[in-house]
Amino acid sequence: MIITCETLAFIGPLGPAETGIILFIIVLLFGAKKLPQLARSMGKSMGEFKRGKKEFEEELKRASDTSDEAGSEEQASSPSEEDSKA
């Protein structure tokens, strides 16, 4: 598990002391026996979130491509203004 020292909006930068305190509190709350199970469930949740995000982005791309194709077909099938004036 890699913990980075990113700045949080209300806390500020997290140093090694703060990270250690947070980890200690987590161990106290969940117990050492539950931590592997907790980490596994968090990993599965993150995997599902990433998979859902990827599917959503692909759906948006397909919808965009479909609308672009429909727009180009309408332009090709409709007569131009010059043809209607003649």
Image (cartoon, rainbow, N blue to C red):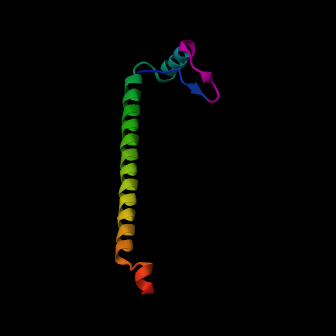
Q: Nearer the viewer, residue 63 or 84?
A: 84
What residue do we see at 54% from left, 24% from top? 6
Q: Position of residue 5 (x, y in %)?
A: 53, 20
Number of numbered discs present? 0
State left or right for residue 66 relative to residue 23: left
What residue do we see at 41% from left, 28% from top? 38
The reply to whether the magenta stretch includes residue 85 is no
Q: Is residue 42 above or below residue 64?
A: above
State left or right for residue 45 relative to residue 17: left
Residue furthest to the front = 86
Q: Nearer the viewer, residue 86 or 26?
A: 86
What residue do we see at 40% from left, 82% from top? 83
Asked if one can make out residue 38 in the rendered structure from this viewpoint, the answer is yes
What residue do we see at 65% from left, 28% from top? 10
Q: Nearer the viewer, residue 5 or 72?
A: 72
Q: Position of residue 47 (x, y in %)?
A: 36, 37
Q: Quadrant of residue 60?
A: bottom left
Residue range corresponding to the magenta coloring: 9-18
Residue furthest to the top = 17
Q: Quadrant of the N terminus?
A: top left
Asked if one can make out residue 34 in the rendered structure from this viewpoint, the answer is no
Q: Quadrant of residue 7?
A: top right
Q: Quadrant of the C terminus?
A: bottom left
Q: Position of residue 56 (x, y in %)?
A: 40, 51
Q: Position of residue 13 (x, y in %)?
A: 59, 21
Q: Is residue 34 above or below residue 84?
A: above
Residue furthest to the right = 10
Q: Quadrant of residue 33?
A: top left
State left or right for residue 5 relative to residue 74: right
